[in-house]
Image (cartoon, rainbow, N blue to C red):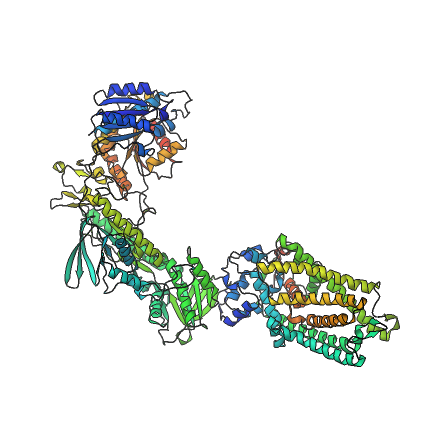
């Protein structure tokens, strides 16, 4: 027999959850329609019904340790089918938002990233940094919009070696360290989960095998993301995310090539590549394809988000990420166009905005919704290791008994 | 008494299956003395058809009409010819033509005029003539009545009943035992919502209504007063009211009982820690605290930071259930022993208290809503406090769902279904609850500053003979244990009826109910009370034979003072003098005829319904001398409230049954006198089937006891038949409800088959 758990509701936590998107959680009356309609919820202790009552009772400890929040891909089907309008999907998202806020410090960043009222500060940080750079380089060139051989070169104002690379390099290190701490916190909560007897799963595998399986079977194929949700919403959601995801992959490759050729070129001559690249350069083609792919993906995702607003509402986290990627994409494309058509004033200003938005995307990544890139993958790998997978996968399992 | 009878055949509903000319001829020949007019009319249920009859009546040729055609349940408006003409409807279309099938089960062809059908129709026509010859047209005998209504109880229901009655223009006498009006409502802080949007608890608005009562010139209020006794009958009651040392008498016409409820004994809450731990209170105690302005812990007077409301704990009620079962069995045994010892059956039913653990589950809806309300009291007075609700059933019915939702929206109210498995003392006099089988998926422990347990409502009628009727059959409502003491009705369609005519119940004495429902209930009961005084005034029955002018008449010369009628009357209508001669109270009577059915001397009759009349109808069945040739004859006595309409509906739906049966409707099986059955059997009929309502604890009889009493009479007659050598299986009572029309033809056919197996009645031919 299990010993009874003395509970201690945390009213403040309920309020926090409501603030980050779980506004309607009190409406749940535990019919479990959500868990029944969810296409990817596991058979054993399915989400999101249990999360709903934990949230209503303010059981903070249970919720922050809940791996299931990452298993939910938020198709919103549960919210659609909920007879009380309690929007379980929104609660799951709110739990993730809480996780972005709390998994790793500094605390103030988590707090700033949770609400629109802090947005000016978030913009101000990169805006000030790059403005200082611009003031210095502008005064060196005696003009804020310098040309070289009649061509616009952004490196004149924002020199890569001295400003862009160190700034973003530091930001990236900061982000990596933050993720390290976040994953460590997650792992501790995973370890605190009670062990149970489970029937019908394979022997637990190593976390690395699980991670590889997750990347191979879920991330690359977007399989779960496709399974998730009702048929009408599936298409836009799936395509939108797929385009956005692979566009980012393309742009990541481009950035990597640029970095390697630039810094590597200093050591190995054969790596050197002229910059700016010609339009027919395969890397440049890949970059432009990435930009176009991003626009397509963003159109799909924005369409879906606007529908979702009507249906469930959306949180600041949703809009922050979508908005930032839009600005990154549009300013990126416009800086390239203005550069090519020689409109120096506009080109530099738009590029400045581009830098700000890229900074906002990368440096704040662990506290933004994009943090799921790391946290969700880790949690999925952990869940897979536990055998906590959706019913579809479970039915393939053999009848074996072991202790987790 | 009809002497000149006209028999009219409705061609439109009877052709082409009947040879109407031949039947008319036979009728004319058989009844040449009494039937002056026998006509075949194209369509009786039309203005033309009606005027044909009216002409014969106006010409003085007929004073009783036999309408042979459709069911008496059809076209009623056409066949009323004023107070001097008896009318009998002969149901030839439904019960003969539509229900007809050959003895072999086949259905007649279009042009066929089956012989068995002609015989059947002839029997029914003869019955009708016999019936009309023995029918009087009832006279309207209105009473001088007091059109004043007595309302017992000045709580929410009583106040509303009084106001409704007075606003309808009738005088009211309101009696309240406390020194001020208001009852329990006066001790409540707020009520759960009574008006849209049904999300906020609200003030009851009691004072406004009390002022309206006090200022209404048609309402006389007696506070600090009790009802000592009620004598008389509807329209003419005398209520004796005790106020301090004064005694006053008031004449009233009808009564609304709105005496409400008492708190259930707290011993039922002891397994949940009540009385054992300091900080365990009932919802009623909490409500009174709230009304006084502060909800505090009994142990230290501190404001509670966490309050647990537990709704429902049926698992700890098992012990009470077992105790009460044993107690019931013991009492039943005692009663049986007593009956064996005493020769004479007691008439007066002694009052029995019926408080039970079951009053708690009965109150579930109210305890649910009250806990939701009080959970919000806690939150409203202290935003950092938490209210837990552990419920077995969240009974928020109808619009109350909005209130439940509103409570849910408060994030400081934690709700779960669950079973409270333990109640223990925590630190600082806190209460620690173990909660299993909850929605959180694992056993929980909840520590609360205060535990609140639900208050069950026990109706006052379960504790006291509230109405104080000076009736021979007892002062209280009889057999309330069926409703665990609630003054409830077994009808869903007549919710205010009690077993005492002219006495109606409203509010929580009737059922546990909210203030909103109680107000409506009071209006309903007030209307019934008004209907009663008006009906009695016009000399007609109130319910369920509303508008019936007849009433039982007694031929006292032959009465042997056996008291059977006083014992059996389900409504306490009969008093008796010192010798035991019954003294009828017509206005208490519901005209079921149970007295007529039970009277061994057959001294009781109605103007249009009597032992002799039905006996003559039975005698007019032409029983073939040989069963093998003409088939058996089986008499069916069918209750006209349920079984008879069910037969009608069966026929309308194309169901068929044996052509050997003859159906006579009766007011209630309670009115069936055993002599009818004995007569039928001695005349050579091969069987007798009684179709009546379900009896027992969940009876459906319109007159409560009719079908049950008939059943015991038939057991008695069975012994007599046995002595005569007639198989007791030839007489059978079957239960049939109005919706049994699918089943009823099968009941008949099965009985006919059994009669065939038994063979002919040995008395045939004597």
The extreme right residue here reads A269
Is B250 drawn above or below residue A138 in the view shown? above
- Asked whether, in this view, residue A377 is left or right of residue A280, the answer is left
- Residue A397 appears in the figure: no
Q: Position of residue B766 (x, y in %)?
A: 23, 23
Give the quarter of the image for residue A21: bottom right
Is B332 drawn above or below residue A344 in the view shown? above
Between B250 and B454, which is closer to the camera in this rendering?
A: B250
Give the quarter of the image for residue B167: bottom left
Query: How many numbered badges does the structure rendering display?
Result: 0
Is B639 drawn above or below residue A182 in the view shown? above
- Asked whether, in this view, residue B732 is left or right of residue B245, the answer is right
Q: Position of residue A305 (x, y in %)?
A: 63, 60
Query: Which residue corresponds to the image point at 21% horizontal and 21% vertical from the top-left?
Result: B33
- Asked whether, in this view, residue A238 is left or right of residue B307, the answer is right
- Residue A254 appears in the figure: yes
- Asked whether, in this view, residue A132 is left or right of residue B606, the answer is right
Query: Which residue corresponds to the image point at 49% horizontal and 59% vertical from the top-left?
Result: A29
Q: Position of residue B51 (x, y in %)?
A: 29, 27
Q: Position of residue B567 (x, y in %)?
A: 20, 44
Q: Quadrant of the N terminus of chain B?
A: top left
Is B116 drawn above or below residue A15 in the view shown? above
Between B379 and A104, which is closer to the camera in this rendering?
A: B379
């Amino acid at each position: 027999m299990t010993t009874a758990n003395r509970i201690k509701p945390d009213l403040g936590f309920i309020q926090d959850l409501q603030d980050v998107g779980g506004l309607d959680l009190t409406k749940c009356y535990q019919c479990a329609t959500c868990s029944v309609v969810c296409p990817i919820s596991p058979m054993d202790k399915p989400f999101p019904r249990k999360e709903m009552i934990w949230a209503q009772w303010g059981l903070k400890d249970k919720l922050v340790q809940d791996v299931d929040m990452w298993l939910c891909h938020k198709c919103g089907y549960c919210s659609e089918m909920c007879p009380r309008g309690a929007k379980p999907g929104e609660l799951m998202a709110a739990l993730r938002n809480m996780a972005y806020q709390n998994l790793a410090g500094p605390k103030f960043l988590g707090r700033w990233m949770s609400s629109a009222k802090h947005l000016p500060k978030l913009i101000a940080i990169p805006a000030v940094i790059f403005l200082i750079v611009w003031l210095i380089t502008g005064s060196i060139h005696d003009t804020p919009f310098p040309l070289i051989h009649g061509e616009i070169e952004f490196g004149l104002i924002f020199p890569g070696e001295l400003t862009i690379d160190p700034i973003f390099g530091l930001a990236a290190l900061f982000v990596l360290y933050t993720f390290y701490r976040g994953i460590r916190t997650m792992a501790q909560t995973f370890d605190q989960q009670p062990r149970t007897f489970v029937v019908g799963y394979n022997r637990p595998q190593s976390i690395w095998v699980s991670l590889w399986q997750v990347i191979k079977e879920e991330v690359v194929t977007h399989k779960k993301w496709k399974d998730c949700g009702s048929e009408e919403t599936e298409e836009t959601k799936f395509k939108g995310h797929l385009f956005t995801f692979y566009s980012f992959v393309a742009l990541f490759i481009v950035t990597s090539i640029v970095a390697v050729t630039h810094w590597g070129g200093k050591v190995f001559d054969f790596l050197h590549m002229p910059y700016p690249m010609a339009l027919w350069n395969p890397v440049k083609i890949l970059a432009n394809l990435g930009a176009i792919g991003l626009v397509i993906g963003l159109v799909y995702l924005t369409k879906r988000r606007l529908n979702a607003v009507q249906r469930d509402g959306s949180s600041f986290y949703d809009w922050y990420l979508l908005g930032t990627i839009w600005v990154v994409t549009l300013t990126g494309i416009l800086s390239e166009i203005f550069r090519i058509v020689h409109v120096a004033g506009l080109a530099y200003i738009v590029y400045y905005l581009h830098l700000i938005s890229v900074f906002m995307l990368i440096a704040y990544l662990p506290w933004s919704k994009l943090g799921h890139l790391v946290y969700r993958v880790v949690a999925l790998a952990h869940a897979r290791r536990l055998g906590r997978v959706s019913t579809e996968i479970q039915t393939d399992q053999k009848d074996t008994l072991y202790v987790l | 008494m009809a002497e000149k009878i006209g028999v009219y055949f409705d061609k439109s509903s009877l052709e082409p299956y009947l040879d109407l000319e031949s039947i008319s001829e036979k009728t004319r020949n058989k009844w040449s003395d009494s039937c002056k007019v026998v006509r075949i009319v194209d369509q009786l249920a039309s203005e033309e058809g009606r005027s044909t009859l009216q002409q014969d009546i106006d010409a003085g040729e007929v004073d009783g009409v036999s309408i042979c055609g459709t069911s008496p349940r059809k076209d009623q408006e056409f066949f009323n010819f004023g107070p001097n003409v008896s009318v009998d409807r002969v149901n030839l279309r439904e019960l003969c033509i539509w229900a007809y099938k050959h003895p072999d089960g086949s259905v007649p062809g279009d042009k066929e005029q089956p012989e068995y059908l002609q015989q059947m129709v002839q029997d029914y026509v003869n019955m009708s003539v016999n019936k009309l010859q023995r029918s009087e047209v009832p006279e309207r005998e209105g009473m001088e009545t007091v059109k004043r209504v007595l309302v017992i109880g000045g709580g929410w229901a009583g106040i509303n009943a009084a106001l409704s009655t007075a606003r309808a223009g009738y005088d009211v006498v309101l009696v309240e035992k406390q020194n001020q009006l208001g009852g329990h409502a006066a001790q409540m802080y707020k009520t759960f919502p009574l008006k849209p949007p049904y999300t906020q608890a609200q003030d009851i608005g009691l004072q406004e209504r009390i002022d309206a009562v006090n200022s209404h010139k048609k309402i006389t209020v007696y506070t600090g007063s009790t009802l000592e006794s009620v004598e008389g009958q509807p329209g003419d009651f005398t209520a004796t009211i005790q106020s301090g040392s004064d005694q006053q008498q008031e004449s009233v016409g009808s009564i609304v009982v709105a005496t409400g409820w008492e708190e259930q004994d707290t011993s039922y809450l002891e397994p949940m820690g009540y009385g054992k731990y300091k900080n365990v209170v009932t919802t009623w105690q909490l409500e009174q605290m709230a009304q006084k302005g502060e909800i505090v812990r009994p142990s230290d007077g501190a404001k509670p930071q966490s309050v647990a409301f537990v709704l429902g704990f049926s698992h700890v009620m098992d012990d009470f259930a077992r105790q009460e079962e044993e107690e019931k069995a013991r009492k039943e045994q005692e009663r049986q022993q007593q009956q064996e010892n005493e020769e004479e059956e007691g008439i007066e039913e002694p009052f029995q208290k019926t408080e039970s653990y079951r009053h708690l589950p009965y109150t579930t809806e109210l305890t649910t809503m009250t806990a939701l309300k009080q959970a919000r009291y806690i939150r409203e007075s202290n935003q950092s406090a938490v209210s837990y609700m552990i419920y077995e059933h969240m009974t928020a019915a109808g619009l109350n769902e909005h209130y439940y939702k509103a409570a849910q929206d408060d994030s400081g109210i934690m709700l779960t279904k669950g079973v409270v498995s333990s109640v223990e003392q925590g630190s600082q006099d806190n209460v620690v609850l173990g909660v299993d089988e909850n929605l959180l998926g694992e056993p929980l422990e909840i520590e609360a500053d205060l535990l609140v347990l639900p208050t069950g409502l026990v109706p006052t009628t379960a504790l006291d003979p509230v109405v104080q009727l000076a009736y021979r059959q007892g002062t209280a409502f009889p057999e309330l244990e069926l409703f665990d003491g609630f003054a409830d009705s077994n009808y869903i369609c007549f919710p205010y009826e009690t077993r005492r005519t002219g006495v109606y119940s409203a509010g929580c004495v009737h059922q546990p109910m909210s203030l909103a429902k109680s107000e409506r209930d009071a209006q309903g009961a007030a209307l019934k009370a008004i209907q009663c005084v008006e009906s009695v005034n016009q000399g007609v029955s109130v319910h369920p034979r509303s508008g019936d002018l007849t009433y039982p008449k007694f031929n006292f010369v032959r009465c042997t003072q056996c008291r059977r009628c006083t014992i059996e009357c389900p409504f306490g209508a009969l008093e008796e003098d010192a010798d035991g001669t019954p003294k009828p109270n017509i206005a208490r009577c519901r005209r079921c005829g149970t007295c007529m059915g039970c009277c061994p001397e057959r001294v009781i009759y109605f103007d249009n319904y009597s032992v002799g009349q039905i006996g003559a109808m039975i005698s007019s069945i032409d029983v073939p001398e040989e069963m093998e040739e003409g088939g058996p004859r089986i008499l069916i006595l069918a209750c006209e409230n349920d079984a008879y309409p069910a037969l009608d509906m069966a026929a309308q739906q194309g169901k068929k049954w044996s052509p050997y049966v003859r159906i006579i409707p009766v007011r209630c099986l309670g009115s069936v006198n055993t002599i009818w059955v004995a007569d039928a059997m001695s005349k050579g009929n091969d069987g007798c089937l009684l179709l009546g309502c379900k009896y027992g604890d969940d009876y459906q009889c319109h007159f409560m006891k009719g079908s049950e009493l008939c059943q015991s009479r038939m057991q008695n007659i069975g012994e007599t038949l046995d002595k005569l050598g007639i198989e007791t299986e030839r007489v059978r009572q079957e239960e049939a409800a109005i919706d049994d029309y699918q089943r009823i033809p099968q009941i008949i056919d099965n009985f006919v088959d059994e009669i065939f197996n038994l063979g002919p009645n040995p008395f045939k031919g004597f």
